[in-house]
Amino acid sequence: MLSVDIRDLSYRYRGQKRPALQGINLEVEEGDFVVVMGPSEAGKSTLCACMNGLVPHFFRGKFRGEVRVLGRNTREHSVAEMAEFVGLVFQDFEAQLFSTNVALEVAFGPENFCIPWEEIDQRVRRSLHLVGLEGMENRTPASLSGGQKQKLAIASVLAMEPKVLIMDEPTTDLDPISKLGIFAIADELRRSHDITLMIVEHETEEAAKARRIVLMKDGSILKDGPAHEVLREVDLMESIGVQPLGVPQFFHTMGANELPLTVEEGVAEFRARGWRIDEAAYEALRRRDAERARSYGEPIIRVEGLSYSYPGQVDALRGIDLEIRRGEFLAIVGQNGSGKTTLVKHFNGLLEPTEGRVVVDGEETTKQGVYRLGQKVAYVFQNPDHQIFSDTVYNEVAFSPRIRGCSEQEIQQRVKEALEAVGLVGMEQEDPFSLTKGGRQRVAVASVLSARPEVIILDEPTTGLDYAEQRSMMELVSRLNQQGHTIIFVTHSMWVVAEYAHRVVVLKDGKVLLQGATREVFAREDLLGETFLQPPQIVSLSNRLGKTLLSVPELVQCTCAGG
């Protein structure tokens, strides 16, 4: 039996010239596990919205074709009717949360289906256990970390026990092990409860768990096949802006015809070919790392015995000692709720220590205040929409120098410099909210650059961006570092850390578990596993070969095709 049957589907949003979907034909069998991948504006989220009736009942536009889910034509059934059978976790998961505590949030859906309270209680407990939020029943959703909120949104849909579960980028804010955990949970539900599973995902390593992958671009399906076949289409994935898996990408670059998919397969194939890691090339990388570390200036941020407790909650930070030097490019990583965002909010005075102190440029933050600190330490929020408020890009970027009393000529110069840095020259009169999320992220970065800060903090700068947008954002951040800015960024994206960060601080339960040069930190897979972190696939492959290489180009550079 088909769970999803889509015939000749095309859809264009009202007021848009280009169709969001065109000529979609898709069959999904009951109990199947499908991952949909593609660049931004490929039509993935619109496709999801078609399967529970949001398109065409809620979002208006021109709809052609037919969508049947469990035999029901979505045009003939309301969103409320479809919700009993189709669960949807939205890409903007925070917009899905509204209750006063975690338990009530999860109970809301079953209550609306008139499930007996005893059964609701069991579902709440079971769903929270599945996503790792047990014990947080009485917490308010607002008090959770971004990753915990995402898990709560997933739990609230799981509690409704839908027959078709659709998740639109459900792991964007989760640590690597939690990402794999969500896929494992979903797969277990599929097998044990006959749930049909469709997940939109940017991260290829998670997609490897699927049975089938659908690649989309410009509203059309380009490729639909078994996951193990699609993941070997390295050229196709790169051409549409989807990040290939590291292991097949490496062997493809090396000219191999048969491409292994897993780390284990990669190690076996590497050794079978008689390849080895060149010691001289590897030592050259290590010397470059050391020279870069010596180039940093004096400490600009010092953290001494920092502890912080949110009102009525356990300690978020416990005795942090940390030193950040001028010119560093530092990543702060850790599992959801480990204290990453809490820590960096102390650097610009958004939070004040419960115990200990934070010193910026030789003076305690508590003596400087947010206004003065803002000239030295800029903060780019995880969600640019929490930061942007002006009607034009120009006014947004001009805001900081304007409130600091700069002349109009100085403001114009600073706006020009900032927009040039982020590649938005010519967009001055655009409404920032009309831009893509990647565009809004760039506006947010420009708006802090205009203050000419020494330190730039970015909280999850790649969340919600496709692979090409993530690359573009991190290349921008890398250029800012090369121009002299000290960069501190919080992220769960391990490939971004591996390829861009110079040094890494790993937090666990509010404490520093590990810190050091990126290569040194990723060599400690055992310790990283304790913090729900996992190196990128290509790093794990190189570790198994005895050296720590941080990217496909590095491994290619250090591989000798000979005995």
Image: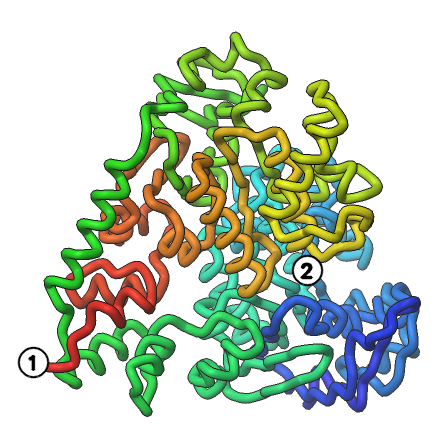
- Quote the CA–CA distance across marks 1 and 2: 51 Å
* Amino acid under disc 1: Gly
Q: How is the image coloured?
A: rainbow
The image shows residue 83 at horizontal and vertical percentages of: 79, 65
> From the viewer's perspective, is residue 123 above or below residue 308?
below
Q: In the image, is 223 to the left or to the right of 437?
A: left
Q: In the image, is 518 to the left or to the right of 68?
A: left
| Extreme residue toward the top, this view | 367
* Front: mark 1 or 2: 1
Mark 1 lies on a secondary structure that is loop
The image shows residue 70 at horizontal and vertical percentages of: 76, 81
Q: In the image, is 101 to the left or to the right of 283?
A: right
Is the residue marked by circle 1 packed among few (<14), some (14-19), or many (20+) residues within 10 Å?
Answer: few
* Quadrant in which residue 141 is drawn: top right
Is the residue marked by circle 2 packed among few (<14), some (14-19), or many (20+) residues within 10 Å?
Answer: many
Residue 563 - label:
1
The image shows residue 557 at horizontal and vertical percentages of: 24, 69
The image shows residue 163 at horizontal and vertical percentages of: 68, 73
Residue 89 - label:
2
Q: Residue at x 46, y 33 (%)?
A: 339
* Amino acid under disc 2: Val
Q: Nearer the viewer, residue 425 or 258?
A: 425
Q: In the image, is 269 to the left or to the right of 326?
A: left
Q: Is residue 488 visible?
A: yes
Q: Residue at x 76, y 70 (%)?
A: 46
